[in-house]
Amino acid sequence: MVYTCCEFEPSQLITLNSMTAVAALLVCLCCMYFSHVTSSEGCCQDEREALLKFKDDLEDPTSFLSSWVGQDPCTWSGVVCDNFTGHVTELHLGWPSSRDDSVFSGKLNPSLLQLKYLSYLDLSNNRFQGIPIPSFLGSMSSLKHLYLDGAGFGGVIPHQLGNLSNLHQLGLQAARRNVLYADSLKWLSGMSSLRYLDLSDVDLSDASDWLNMINTLPSLSELYLSNCRIRHIPPLNNLNMSSLSALSLQQNDFDQTSVPSWVFHLQSLTYLNLGINSFDGPISDELQNLTSLRTLSLNSNRFNHSIPNWLYRFSHLETLDLYGNHLDGKVSTAGIGNLSSLVDLNLSVNHGLEFERGIPESFKSFCRLRSLSLQNVKLNQKVSELLEILGECASDTLQVLLLFNCQLSGQLTSRIGNFKKLYRLILGNNSISGSLPMSFGEMTSLIDVDLSRNNISGTIPTSFGELAQLAYVDISQNSLHGVVYPEIHFANLRKLSCFYASGNKMVMKAKPDWVPYKLLEDLDLESWYVGPGFPHWLKSLQYLKSLDLSNSRISEPIPDWFWSISSQFYYLNFSRNQIPGRLPHVIPVVLTVSYFDFSSNFLEGPLPAISSNLTFVDLSNNLLSGNLFKFLCFNPSEMRATEFLSLYGNNLTGEIPDCWKTWPSLSSIRLGGNKLSGKIPKSLGYVSSLVSLRLQNNRLSGQIPPSLQNCSRLVIVDLSDNGLEGKIPEWMGQSLSRLSILSLRRNKFHGSIPKEICGLQSLQILDLSHNSLSGALPECVANLSAMATPNNNTLGVIAVYGVRGQSLLDTQILVRKGQLLDYSTILNYVRSLDLSWNDLSGQIPNEISSLAALKYLNLSHNSFSGAIPKDLTAMLSLESMDLSMNQLSGSIPSTLGSLTFLNYLNLSYNNLVGKIPSSTQLQSFDSWSFIGNQELCGPPLNVDCSNDSKVPGLMDGEENDGEHALYWFSGSVALGFVGGFWGVVATFAFIQLSTNPESEFKDHTVPAKQERCSLKRALLICLGCVCFGRATSSEGCDQDEREALLKFKADLEDPSSSLSSWVVQRDCCIWSGVVCDNFTGHVTELHLGWSSSWDGSVFSGKLNSQLLQLKYLSYLDLSNNHFKGIPIPSFLGSMSSLKHLYLDGSGFGGVIPHQLGNLTNLKQLGLQAARDYVLYADSLRWLSGLSSLRYLDLSDVDLSNASDWLSMINTLPTLSELYLSNCRIRYIPPLKNLNMSLLSGLSLYHNQFAQTSVPSWVFHLRSLTYLDLGVNTFDGPIPDQLQNLTSLRTLSLSGNRFNHPIPDWLYRLSHLEALYLCGNKLDGKVSTAGIGNLSSLVYLDISDNYGLEFERGIPESFKSFCHLRSLSLNNVILNQNVSELLEILGECASDTLQALLLFNSQLCGQLTDRIGDFKRLSRLDLRKNSISGSLPMSFGEMTSLYYLNLARNKISGTIPTSFGALAQLNYVDISQNSLHGVIYPEIHFANLRNLACFYASGNQMVLKAKPDWVPSKLLDELDLESCYVGPVFPHWLRSLQHLKSLDLSNSGISEPIPDWFWSMSSQFYYLNFSHNQIPGRLSHVIPVVSTYSLVDFSFNCLEGALPTISSNLTFLDLSSNLLSGNLFKFFCFNPSEMRATEFLNLFGNRLTGEIPDCWKTWQSLSIMRLDRNKLSGKIPRSLGYLSSLRSLRLQNNRLSGEIPPSLQNCSRLVTVDLGHNGFEGKIPEWMGQRLSRLSILSLPGNKFHGSIPKEICNLQSLQILDLSHNSLSGILPKCIANLSAMATPNNDTSGLISPFAGAWKSFSDSLILTRNGQLLDYSTILNYVRSLDLSSNNLSGRIPNQITSLVAIQYLNLSHNSFSGAIPEDLTAMLSLESMDLSTNQLSGSIPSTLGSLTFLNCLNLSYNNLVGKIPSSTQLQSFDSWSFIGNQELCGPPLNAADCSNDSRAPGLMDGEENDEEHALHWFSGSVVFGFVAGFWGVIVTLAFVGPTVTNPRI
């Protein structure tokens, strides 16, 4: 048998013997070698033709199949043949990605069936555009590998594929754009050999048999079912997929929440992906059975709890992805270290997950790690430490590092450069600081880097330019600064497409010829210093689509070439620059949506013609001129897409052209604020989309064209301030039905107001003022429903224009109270009707009162007659009404008084008569509101026409005498009955009490002695009532005792006459506070104590020794009086009958007299010291005599020197209660023998002992029921020995340093009633079961233990806490819904709970109506949580509430009206929430009579108070900052007599301050009305009596003269007002009275006249600002008396004369600014001698002459010296080098820029400096500015070389002088220099090359000198424009355009990277030799080793 090469079957080789096999191999090799030489057939002809037919049906855009020619297809691209038979066995026609442009499309030809030996077909990632998978593929029975992944097939998968019984691998992953689906997978059952199946993205939602069919494939090894829309996982009884090694069920969103159980039995799994589903709960423990796993992905599920410990034992795990779950807790440091085989680790976006101490050291062994993603996982680690750990082993492998928002800190170190393979680095939103290291550029693989929102400072390292792979960079919102040289910093960034760097302070200095890389698409350099030149490098950015260079200081015209590339942009923003010059003739834009903003520049010249599809155009606020014709009519046949057009605020002239037909898309036209003339064109009527038309403030004339009625969508029409004439068209009220704003003010309209206007139901603002309208006001005005319906927002034009987040807000200027006000943000809510300044007549129709929503009504300056409409009560929204200058008659309607919001009223100059109605509202207006009405009288006019009458209700609270007698009679009868009944009972009770000496411990709310005394006192009173007037004695009390008491009284000061009953004529036993024995008549008790020393009734004076006459006195109570530090009288020790002595808090001082030790019968002794006086004892030996003592209180007594305190107290065997709080005891001595075994109450509170352990003897006090060890320094765990004190009812350990969790034994003290553990360092979780045992608790306080946590909030067991009165858990983590908490507490404690304090407890949810059940709650603190929703109405049911704090939550809605029922409220803080709506104080604060503090800032509420509303008179502090209180001045303030702090800043007040307010201003220590619009005049005098007080009325509209101020006003700010007049009265009101004022700011007013010479009395002044006024004259000499003055600001006035020598006495001066006045003479030498602290000396713009005094050089603190624009001459002193503050970098010498000492407001000084020709205001960085400006003088001579020693100077300006000679050479040290101007001098010589080293220099001007030679070559100097050097005739070289004066030379290093030809050839030669050797050697080896056809599977 003979075999040919084509016929030989390799299988037959098996039957040959070994020698035959070798021979056969040799024959085969020969055949292979000579096959193409000796044969021309190659393979079967049929297969070649089949492939060509297949090719014909394919679309091959890149001619990939161009090689498919010739006879041998085995050489064609993608074709693989059998090496022996020549048959086609494989087709490789797939691609790595469908995004490749080379992909095929078309269809598949059935000719493929001819390839009968085809075993491998790959068509993946082509684009077959949704055609079905051909069914004929199922007939290709030889196929073993079929890959159609992402090929673009669609429709149903043909079941014929099931015929491929030999198939091993099947890839059918669907392309995302095409739907591929299967209704059933039954066809899979025929593929018994299938090992690999990928159905990802195939829709299997209807294939319910998916799992059962796949389970029939026993050989299946890999299964991928990602995103198959499978909703249900059916049960699986018999698992047949035991060989499965890889499984993906990713992104199916199953309806099950648990992982199917059959997964846990796939024990061969090495790859498992269950990501992006809905699995929840803990990660299943059964997964630990899958011990072969190498990849585990559970990402984007809802798994919670911590990472299970078993997972850390998977030491072979290579990929772990737990991204986007709800995992929490701490990552096990030891456990994670076991996973050292990890390649990819992703734990990101598990917000509760935390590495306790950052990435652990064990990561040093993670040598295979390629990707680490921990975004939003807390690391709390320094980034340098992290890099050190990862760099130990992973620096050569790590490719991805994602650590966004991981709480990283510290600095990036050079270690970062070791990560050479890192291509993605995300470190955004951390706290990384420091500069970027140079090694950053060594990460050469970096593609994506995000360092945004950190604190990175310094400059971008030059090595940044080496990152050649970078595509995306975000370094925005850092603190980067310095200069960026793009030629260096961006040197090799060829792939950069996105660069974001906003929010930094960098300077871009690009060479003119720099060419950035062309791939850049998105560039944001907002707020960079890119200017002043226009960036020419933009020219090369062909792909740039979005560019933001706003606020980048560009001040050069836009070049023509830029406009030629502008068509590529969709977003272009150059706004807020100083760009001058002209716009091009045409602005082309070709993109569909485009944004063009060049607003707020200096553009001039005519308008350009714009492209037809430019959508948004804003050229407002420029200097554009010319007419509009070319702009609007450039191509009259082309339709425009423009929607927004703003040309507002330019200098445009001419007529508005009549070519608007092509602008139909326009929505907003703004042409206002120009000089346009002519008529409104008719073609505007074609702009049917127009919503807003603004043509105001032009010179338009003619009539309103009728064509405008076609613009039916118009909402705003503003044609005001023009010259339009004719009648107002009737059609405006018919066709323009959507109008909300119609303003025709200041035109020439005449005729009547058309009634059709009444048809505009959406009209909110109608302004027809200043015309010539006549006739009556139509009665149909009532039809203007938008003005009649409050809060009906009909204005729809205030909307966001949606391009890249840019918002557009419409505005409207309205006249209010004679002022032009610009409304924008609240425009929707404004309702205004202004018809003033016309000739309207007739009566004002009553129908006008139906306009209930109207806020502003102005009918003034007309001819209206008749009466004012009476029914005005409905116009409750009216804030301003002006009816002045009419002919109105009759009386003023009383209904005007009910308009509570009315803050402006003008009825002047009418014919009104009668009395002005009495109301709080009307009498609050000034008299000018009513003048000019001759027969009008009554206040506020000075014409009196009323009769006196009793003020209603004044005496309502007083009873008449008859009622008084009746009450006494009834009371006497009742008292007699009670006395008769209780007489015997009380007697026995008293005897029983006297024989029972045991005393309870001191309760923390009611002291024990007071409780007992109250009971005894009550019993004694009862006894006194029933003893028949002591029938056994007719003499009354003892005469000696009465006289003794009277003498005692005589020495007491009794301010409230509490002892007025102590008179001789009366029995002393019935005197107040005196108790006598009922049988003997002797005085036995004196009750002269008080419940609090704050009571105004307390006694003072001294104690008379006549008390010794009271020999039977057993009870003396003088507690809480005010004896002002006098010693305790020693004679008290002789009152031997005393058993009870209480001197607590009575104000005694000095040493406690030892004579008290003689009181051997004493049982209770209270000596608690008053806080204002020191009471002390050096020894307590005297205690040893008090053997009967049971109660001892020495709290606040200084026992620091009484070392025997413990031993002496231990001698008292009967002592039951001991209180030693705050006794300054430092040491607790040891105690061997405990003698205080009866002690039941012990307090050692607040002593700060030196010991840190609780003394051991405390643990033996087994009788203790009360123990207080709070506020000491005890630390460690809570001692276990305390559990021995089983009788404890109260335990207080608060304010110590106890740590560890709460011990379990504490939960067993089930009888505990009070537990205080607040303010320790306890941590861990509160035992839910344990805390439930303490159900007897009355008081529980575990606040401020920041590590303490209730695992699931307050547990259910709290439902049985039925005695609970106070619960304080501030700063304890609850993580609970507040509604659930209220439900639990309300179960049993709603009737007992009095205090609930849950500040910062992580509460969420909403307050429910259950809150109202807590009727006894007096303190509620829920601050700083996340409580949302509105306050329920039941809030008002907590009628005991005293303290309420809900600040810093998310509470919304309005305050419920029930709030006003909380009559006990004293303190309220609802600030920093989202509350809104209207507060009606008459309702909301109805019964808040006890309110003292109310804070509501940070909300959006409106306060609407009636004029006669009277708030709580106890109000002490009120903060309504940013609440809308105005526009009326709040007249209810008048009744607040106790108000001391008031903040109504930014509250919308626009009414003058009434006189009555100034009369009460003396009560304030803080008064802030700043940032309002308050007009009018200040009071003549501002009285302030507080020692330290602040008054701030800055930023208002105050006018008139300055007031005189009280001498002790400390801080006064009246800046930025309209105050006028001179200063004399203000400063010299009382020339003999010294002033306490320290801060005075009158900046920015209109003050005139001279500065008065009366400063002797103002010697406390530290800061004085009189700048920016119109003051004239000389500086007064008496200013020299201000020895405390630190800042003197008089600039921008009209002052003259010389600087007075007396100022040299102000030696503390730091800032002197006298600039821009008319001062003359020489600069005084003494300024440099006496004012040695000067940091700022500014004298520009004056007339100083002479030379600069050398003494100035002595000012070593001088940072800023500005002497510019004077007439100074001579030379610049060489001693200038002595200005050390300018010579020392970062030396902050100015102490002025700091908060105003002791004030509530901070004050920072500021200074206006000239920089680059602009006036810039420096404030916050003023301390760091160093500047020297001597420009515009006549200084001459050389610039001294010494100037170069001023190395800290940033701004140097010597321009416009006569300096000559050369520029100093040694400038290299002046590295801080940013701006240098030496222009317009006579400097000569060449430019020093050292200028090129000044890297921060961004402004240089050497123009107009005599400089010569070539401009030195440097990156720095060539970056400046030519104007920096012009005017130097012999200067040459770039950037000048003069002839080149340099020799050409090769740029250094330009070709360094290129090799020469010889080296190139040598490399190729060496490489060829090596290659030849390798090929020859391995050729034989491979030939011998070849054993048959080699067909590889690229998928395996």
Image: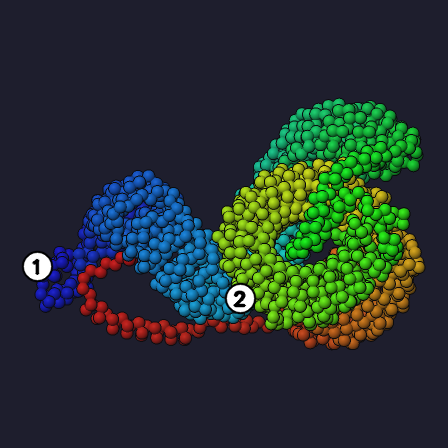
Label 2: which residue?
382
**Front-most of residues 453 and 812:** 453
Is residue 1620 rendered to the left or right of residue 463?
right
Q: Position of residue 327 (x, y in %)?
A: 45, 54
Q: Position of residue 249 (x, y in %)?
A: 35, 49
In the rendered image, the residue lying farthest to the left is 1
- The residue drawn where x is 20% and y is 57% is 82
In the rendered image, the residue lying farthest to the front is 1032
Image height check: is 220 above or below 1246? Answer: above
- The residue drawn where x is 75% and y is 63% is 1159
Q: Quadrant of the N terminus?
A: bottom left
| Whole-number angstrom distance, CA of label 1 to CA of label 2 | 79 Å
Residue 1740 visible to an observer of this rendering: no
- The residue drawn where x is 84% and y is 24% is 866
Q: Secondary structure at mark 1?
A: loop
Label 1: which residue?
2
Q: Secondary structure at mark 2?
A: strand
Image height check: is 883 above or below 1132? Answer: above
Is residue 844 rendered to the left or right of residue 1899?
right
Amino acid tagged 2: Lys
**Front-most of residues 108 and 1282:** 1282
Amino acid tagged 1: Val
- The residue drawn where x is 59% and y is 63% is 1261
Image height check: is 64 above or below 1721? Answer: above
